[in-house]
Image (tube, rainbow, N blue to C red):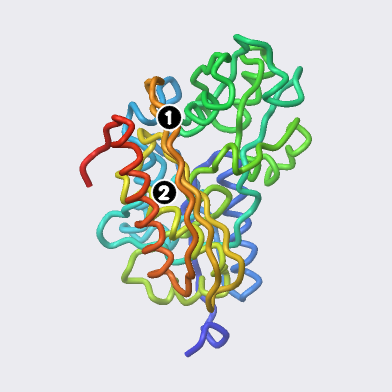
Amino acid sequence: MTAHTLPPLTLTIATRESRLALWQAKHVQTLLQQHGHQVSLLGMTTQGDQIQDRALSQVGGKGLFVKELEVALTQNRADLAVHSLKDVPMTLPDGFCLACVMERADPRDAFVSNRYLRLEDLPPGAVVGTSSLRRVVMLRSLRPDVTITPLRGNLDTRLRKLDQGQFDAIVLAAAGLNRLGLGSRVRSMFDPDLMLPAAGQGALGIEVCMDRPDVMQALAPLVHWDTWLAVEAERAVSAAMGGSCSMPLAAFATLSEGRTGGLMTLNAAWGDPDGPLPLVRVHQQGQVADRASAKTLGQGVADALRAGVLAQGGTLPLV
C-alpha cells in the first residue's frame, strides 16, 4: 500500500502551547488534513517552557522541550509531535525516531532592534540579548565590544523585553518571526556565512514512536528530502562533537541538487564560551546521495572541527 492509498487516520499532534509551537502544529495539521486524515491537537506545557530564569545549558538542555511530548506519545495520548528541529536533541530516546523533516524556512538569524538597523550600528557597550551560546560566540567574534546578556522566554516575551528597553537589540531566528507574521520587526538579516545558523534551524521535525509505521506512512508526503539531507549533515556534526545547548556550535549545509545526488557544502564553527580562544571554522564539500552519505560528511566536518578546537587549546566532551 502506498502513501496515496493509505486509509485516512485519526491522529493527535502533541505540541507545546507557545504561539509559535501552536502555529507549527496547526501547519502540520492542515497538511495532514489535506491528505484526508482527521487531526486534533494536544497542547502541553513542557519543563523548558516553565523555566524562564536560567539558560537551557544550565538546566538540562534541549530535551526539556520534548520530554513531556514523548510521554504523551508512549501513553498513546498523541500519535506525533511537531518540533522546531533545532530544539530536538541529537540522539532521541530508545523507541522514538524522526519520521519526517519538512521543507526548511529561512534558516538565518535576524537582528531585531527599535533603534539600530544593523549589528554594525550598535555603539560600544550596547546590550544585545540572547541565551544561545552559539549566538554568543558568533556575536563576540563580530562585535567583541558589545555586552551580551541572557534572554529567555517565548518569542513574544523576548520582543516585549526589547520593547521595555532592557536591550538595545536581540537576535532571533528569522523563521519564527516570519511564521507568526512578525517579519516587520526584523531590521536586518545576518549573512549565514558570518552568523552560522544552528543545526536544523528553520526546519520542522516530526517525532513518532518507532512502532507506528502507519503514522510514518501518513507523514511521507510531507517529507522534503533536500532539507532532510542538509539537516542530517548538520546534526551529525553536532552529535559527533557532543553537541547540546551547552555546546557553542553552529552547522549549516546547502545542497546544490536534489535527493538523487548533489554537491553539499557544509560549514561549521565552534567558539570558546569563556572568551579567550578564537572562533574555529571548518568548510567542506562532498557528494551526497542519501542520509548515510550526508551523515558521513557531517562526521568528517566534526573531525576537522574537533582537531581545530584541540589545536587552539580548547576542551570538548568525550563522545
53 or 89: nearer the viewer = 89
Name the residue furthest left: 318
Q: Nearer the viewer, mark 1 or mark 2?
A: 2
Residue under label 2, please give it: 88
Q: Which residue sits furthest top?
A: 125
Residue 39 seen in the current view: yes
In percent of width and height, residue 86 lies at 48, 46
Query: Residue 118: horizontal and vertical position, in percent?
Result: 72, 26
The image shows a total of numbered marks equal to 2
Labelled pair 1, 2 in contact (Cβ < 8 Å) = no
Determine the residue positioned at 44% across, 58% down: 233
Q: Secondary structure at mark 1?
A: helix
Above or below residue 252? Residue 263 is: below
First along the sequence among labels 1 and 2 = 1
Q: Which residue is mark 1?
A: 50
Query: Callout 2: helix, strand or loop?
Result: loop
Q: CA distance from mark 1 to mark 2?
A: 17 Å
Snapshot quadrant of residue 143: top right
The dot on residue 179 is none
The residue at the point 32 percent across, 61 percent down is 96
Say if 255 sits above or below 107 in the image: below
Q: Amino acid at mark 1?
A: Gln
State left or right for residue 65 relative to residue 312: right
Q: Residue furthest bottom?
A: 1
Instruction: Please say if 276 is above or below 242.
Output: above
